[in-house]
Amino acid sequence: MDIKEAINGIENIGILTKKNANIDAIGASLALFFALRSMGKKTCFPSNNLPDEIIKLTNKKNGKQFQITFSEEISEVYYEKKDKGLILYLTPKDKNINDDNFSCKIISNEDFFSSNYNLLFTIGIDDFKEVEELCGADQLFNCAIINIDDNLNNQNYGEINIIKDNQPLSQTITCLLKEIDEYTNKEVNSFLLYGLSFSNKKTDNNKKISTMRWLLKNGGDLSLLPGEPQKNKLLEIILNNLSCTNNTYISTVLESDFEKSKTTSKDLSFVAEKLKNFLNIPSFFILWESKTSPLSVKGLFYTNKKYIVNKMNNKFRGAYKEKGGIFLTDEERINIAKEKILSYLNYGNN
């Protein structure tokens, strides 16, 4: 049985992760949750004993809404926006309409927490006993389980077991959704990016970064990451422009990119920290256009390869440390500067 066959014809699906789940598992769980909902499935979390982050984000999605009902024909609808809120105007066709034809009430979306499901996805739970404790043994009776984990010690308790110790859970869910040819939307892809951004799983960085770029190009964004939205937008731009040569990544930032993200070159230190500590990229360069006169391309880099630091120090003026530095090129065009650096480093000879 494959995943597509397992969910075909199933209407009620539960998704479960552990109470102390990491951000990767949380992002993977929420992405799968909203992807299944977009497929028309009634999806729920079968336990209230979940990470606070899942409860917070689902409650945010489950916010209150106002429903205005008018039971007769109308000739005009418009609204007036105020500093705080708005005023909605309805003009009825029949001038004799009274208040009985109008109502307004607060409604909420359906509850995300339920015990009504006949297929359960478990995300990042290696021990079946923990599944029973979170759901209750009675709820699991006659319920198929799809077990997704990154721990080789997993007990393989599911009807389908997808255990990959060499990649983040969010990446596994990305592959799963692509495999079943189901549409993923901005919301789903943003949760997957959220999980991937915080995964500390030692994995193939080329595959992880290419997955993140695919998610960004298909509508996802980094809005769920903590910190200033403008800086996260700059990080998105740099990831989109990232290319790799022999495990050293290089990205470019145009002046228009700074304007689009409402940032400056000073914010590149934030991006460098994310690439180094959150995405665990061992070697990377960021080049950007400088407005200084004469126009020039500047760069910063981080690397765990000593020979790269030595070569850069011998070739380009700058300030260097043991694992990186900031430097100035003699080029005005960023693409030429990029080619010049890659050519000079001559990655085959270290």
Image (cartoon, grey):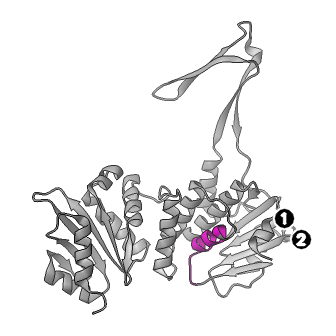
Report the disc number at residue 118.
Answer: 1
Q: Classify 79 as above or below 265.
A: above
Would residue 313 be visible to someone looking at this image?
A: yes
Residue at left offset 74%, top offset 6%? 96
In the picture provided, is 184 more to the left or to the right than 45?
A: left
In the picture provided, is 211 more to the left or to the right than 260?
A: right
Q: Main secondary structure of the magenta part?
A: helix
Marks 1 and 2: in contact by CB < 8 Å?
yes
Camera-side residue of 241 and 84: 241
CA gap, disc 2 to disc 1?
A: 7 Å
> Quadrant location of the N terminus?
bottom right
- Locate residue 143: give its quadrant: bottom right
| Magenta highlight range | 166-178
Residue at left offset 67%, top offset 88%? 153
Camera-side residue of 187 and 116: 187
Report the disc number at residue 333.
Answer: none
Instruction: Give, as a three-letter code, the residue at label 1.
Output: Asn
Residue 37: x and y, percent? 71, 55
Would residue 322 be visible to someone looking at this image?
A: no
Instruction: Give, as a three-letter code, the residue at label 2.
Output: Asn
Rate crowding at label 1 as few (under 14), some (14 to 19) or many (20 or more) other CA atoms within 10 Å.
some
Camera-side residue of 38 and 226: 38
Rate crowding at label 2 as few (under 14), some (14 to 19) or many (20 or more) other CA atoms within 10 Å.
few
Q: Secondary structure at mark 2?
A: loop
Residue 27: x and y, percent? 58, 65
> Quadrant location of the C terminus?
bottom left
Closer to the N terminus: mark 2 or mark 1? 1
The residue singled out by tag 2 in the image is: 142
| Farthest left residue in view | 294
